[in-house]
Amino acid sequence: MDQNRGIHSEDLTTTRANGLKRLSHPAGQLPSVDRLLRSNAGQTLVAAFGRAPVASVLAKQISLARKEILASGKPAVSEQHLLAASENELKQSSVALKTILNLTGTVLHTNLGRARLPDTAIQAIAQVASEPSNLEFDLATGSRGDRDAQLESLLKALTGAEAATVVNNNAAAVMLVLNTFALGKSVPVSRGELVEIGGSFRIPEIMMRSGCQLVEVGATNRTRISDFENAIDETTAMLMKVHTSNYEVQGFTESTSESALADLANQHNLPFMIDLGSGTLVNLTQYGLPREPTVQEALAQGATIVTFSGDKLLGGPQAGIIVGSRQFIKAIKQNPMKRALRVDKMTVAGLVEVLRLYQTPETLVQTLPTIRDLARPENEIKKLGETVLHALSTAETGEFDLTLVPVKSQIGSGALPIERIPSWAIAITAARSTSPNRTLMNLSEQLRACSNAIVGRIHDDQLLLDLRTLYNPDPLIAGLRHTLAS
Ligand SMILES: *Cc1c(COP(=O)(O)O)cnc(C)c1O
């Protein structure tokens, strides 16, 4: 049936452009939801988003228009406007996650999705997402295969570990190791390492939920190997060292070395785990970055198990990687919890591609976005800033002043909490405003509402947009142009 047949005769006199009507309605005469649904544009929306969601958004826009007309004395709102506003809202709310411009200066931002993946990983993920694969199927024998097989051989080759396995994230990795070796038993941990990583990951709570008993040893600032020696008894299941990712104790401090703990664990025939957190496979100083312990070093220091994240410094998809001695990894794989924490095929595909890049470490700066962003030369960032500033006229920046200022970026995700990387940011100030901070808060909100949401940070009455992870300036220029003068 022709959906337009029931429309009142006034429609026939309406100009039509792209199926949208230009009729204007004062408050009392706003169109009904039904009428908008029956229009050509309404039908297109229904086809794209479904009748119920479209109807509810149209109702909301009509009621907003009514309020606006009554409040501001605005004479009328057109059907075209109502339909366009509804389309905008439906489009905005239909994507699960919006992509944003991360100008916070924190490269691996946990709230903003951490690592950006290389193209090879993205292609591999798209491929396995759309087609069946040999995820757990051995093509040579035609029998069941091991989900971790390819990841394990790459991880063994790259780290020198005897064995490896992968789970959903590093929190899961720590939990699985504790649950495998220390269920119903105790684990001594230095008081200086009982950290909260962020959100809900706190070492004491994870230990409790993994079914093991935490035995606190030493003091917040100083823990000696004798503290561990004294704590070991028949209930002790393993030793553990946690990389204190996101904070640092300075001053009168002492901590036990990895190798001393490894020796002690060895004497008592216990597994020794190092939770590296970020864990990198390459020496970061070659990129002019501060030192961060590598997985290979942790193994060389005698750790029998090392856990680290897939999406922190490694630069891959979310995953928790466990490498170590054959017997311990075997026990971990046999824990029924492994099944509950296993990775998805898309993670396997993406992580394999990221690890493959590490087989040619000399090109990581070009091939792996995380390393590329972190190693990016300061002057390249500065140049990009100049491009952005030159593109904006003073009329376009309105009441705001924009300057290019040197700042410090952070790696994020807990790595290297103190040391920071020199970078450049666009600093926006509202010097002429009576409440500059309020004005900047409003501006931040508007920038976050842009179609390419722009996220920076406010510091010292400046809105700082750190350009370290930005390559194409156009969306930023467009967003600033759209927002500043309005
Ligand atoms: C980040 C971190 C974790 C948690 O890793 P996720 O991959 O975020 O689950 C655990 N331990 C340490 C030391 C960390 O830095």
Image (tube, grey):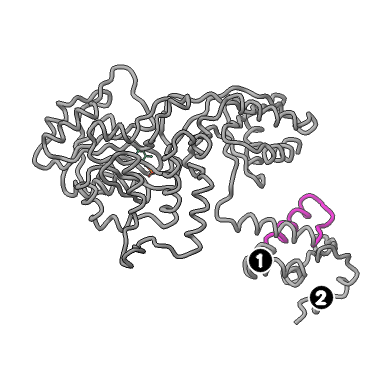
Residue at 36% across, 46% down: 154
In percent of width and height, residue 357 lies at: 45, 42
Q: Magenta residues, as a range?
A: 60-79
Q: Quadrant of residue 416?
A: top left
The kind of residue tagged 1 is Ala
**Mark 1 residue element:** helix
Query: The C terminus is located in which quarter?
Result: top right
Name the magenta segment's main secondary structure: helix
Q: Position of residue 314 (x, y in %)?
A: 42, 39
Please state which of the two labelled residues, at mark 1 or mark 2, is closer to the viewer. Answer: 1
Q: Position of residue 420 (x, y in %)?
A: 48, 25
Q: Give the quadrant of ligand 1.
A: top left
* Residue in the image at 42% along x and 49% along y: 352
Left or right side of 65 for 377: left
- Residue named by callout 1: 48
Asked whether 77 falls inside the magenta stretch, the response is: yes
The residues bearing labels 1 and 2 have C-alpha atoms spaced at a distance of 22 Å
Does 110 lie within the magenta span? no
Whether residue 75 sits left or right of residue 420 in the image: it is right
Amino acid on which the number 2 mark rests in the picture: Ile
> Label 2 belongs to which residue?
7
The one of 120 and 37 positioned closer to us in this rendering? 120
